[in-house]
Amino acid sequence: MGIRGLYEIGTDDGNIGPGVFFIPRRRKHTLPHEVLAVIFTFAVAQHGHDEPGFLVKHPSMTITHTCRRWREVALATGNLWTDIVLTFPISNEQLSRTVTWLLRSKTYLLDILLDFRDPDWDWEDEDTHGFRWADMEAVLQLLLPSAARWRTFELRTDTWAPIFVFLLHTRKVGSSLRTLEKLHLARCNTYFASKGRLFEPVMLRQHLPLFGGEQARVPRLREVMLTGVHIDWSAPPRMNLTKLELKYQAADVMPTVAHFTQILAASPNLEVLEIVGSGPQFTAVVDGASSIATHGEGGEADGRALRGTIKLARVTRCTFGFVDVNYAVQLLALFNLPALRELSLQDVSASLRHQPPDDAGLLIDWLVTNADATHGTSISPHDAVGSTSACTSRLPLRQLRTLSLHAIYAARTKFARLYEASSGLTALCLYDVCDGALEALEGDVVPRLETISACGVDEELFTHAVERRGAALKSTYLEESHQTFYRKLDRT
Ligand SMILES: *[C@@H]1O[C@H](CO)[C@@H](O)[C@H](O)[C@H]1NC(C)=O
């Protein structure tokens, strides 16, 4: 007799391998140390990085507090100690625990999560926030010596100062970040994405180079998420990304179209692109006044000249969130995404201005008439980025499988056109949309639809729309108001 079960363990190259374990029941303590260590590793890998009470309930702590032998084995097993988490308010206990974990983790790669948001902060004055410049310096002093072991790094703040300190003090470690795979910097304040809002605090507006800029070596960095965080866009590290997110930025600190294009051209393997709020600047904002940007021959204000100049052959998933419909059209026209399968369109102005969203009819018309311009040549997924052969905007609606619409308001006929053009859809998500989006789902539109989910829409209309489609359609209805929906967005 014994214990039988399945385990999954992380291997050195990051793969998860399934296996079977069998523990013979004999005398106490006959389980070899190595097997015990594998089981502990399994327990830790199952634990979510972001669960509430993460530290108190961390399995490594439970294991070390069980018995002397377990403690000895656990302390000798470096990969049980690689989750480095610090949260507001920072205590000496947290700092000393971090020192201990960094030591115990030996040479294993680290997953770092720093969450310095204060749920009680009033959003008024950044200087009154409880997490300050000096606190961030103290944290970095502990973490920087292990920069060569960072695998994932996530920093969430309410205010700008800690992000500034991070960018300032990581300028020198650009040559050590050889194992970094994922970076997420978030100043979680959606306010700056509002139309016409400029970056604050002005004193710290300076564009600091990420990890020191072009000299940085980040060969394994694949995912970069910048939420309300700007860097020196003209000299980013050389990054070969599969995922890029730019969200909730103030428009005046965003890159010019030329720099934006360069950044994307450096990542021909990009698969996921999310832009919410402000994207690149077609015109530069100088001291609050608009002027035509001088970068790029011919002037970037002329959107037509730039149509389809950003070709990303492998992008399958794309999210565009906008505060201005005209800007959204200008931005989308830059792209040629021949492999697109999932598209999400979000009007974020409603959540920011607390008023109804703009009429997105213009955007839908543009998508339907221009975005799917077919040209005889077939596009191989290996075509170079920005190749000049096919400079046509292209967001092929016909091959979309998933479409998500968030707070999109337009006439019912516009939605009908959109659905007709997206005839291959198998999944549709409608969040906080107007009634027309549901009413347009009649007859035989989107015949291959398999799932539909909705949130914050009229329940009766939704039920009718689902019933009209027959029993094969799987539907999910979530009752949530705008407020909860966006609060959730803000906090993720
Ligand atoms: C870029 O990343 C992909 C995997 O995401 C990899 O296959 C490719 O070799 C990388 N290219 C360079 C130049 O490092």
Image: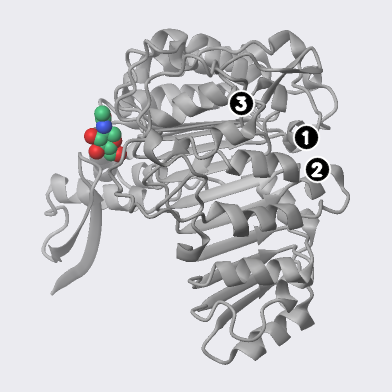
Q: Is residue 227 above or below residue 474?
A: above
- Residue 396 image position (x, y, % from top left): 49, 57
Viewer-proximal residue, 377 or 160? 377
Residue depicted at x 71% and y 27%: 250
How far is the residue under mark 1 from the one under mark 3? Answer: 13 Å
Left or right: residue 436 versus residue 37 is right
How far is the residue under mark 3 from the one under mark 2? Answer: 18 Å
Instruction: Tell me the crowding category of disc 1: few under 14, some 14 to 19, or many 20 or more residues within 10 angstroms, Cα based.
Output: many
For marks 1 and 2 on the same chain, the one whose residue lies earlier in the sequence:
1
Left or right: residue 110 versus residue 19 is right
Question: How many marks overall?
Answer: 3
Indicate which disc residue 191 carries. Answer: 1
- For badge 1, the amino acid type reads Tyr
Circle 1 — which element? Answer: helix
Circle 3 — which element? Answer: loop
Residue 351 appears in the figure: yes
Q: Are marks 1 and 2 in contact (CB under 8 Å)?
A: yes
Tag 2 residue: 352
Tag 3 residue: 229
Q: Is residue 203 above or below residue 120?
A: above
Which of the 4 image quadrants contains residue 88? top right
Q: In the picture, which quadrant includes the C terminus?
A: top right
Which of the 4 image quadrants contains residue 99? top left
- For badge 3, the amino acid type reads Val
- Residue 204 image position (x, y, % from top left): 69, 11
How far is the residue under mark 1 from the one under mark 2? Answer: 6 Å
Residue depicted at x 61% and y 57%: 369
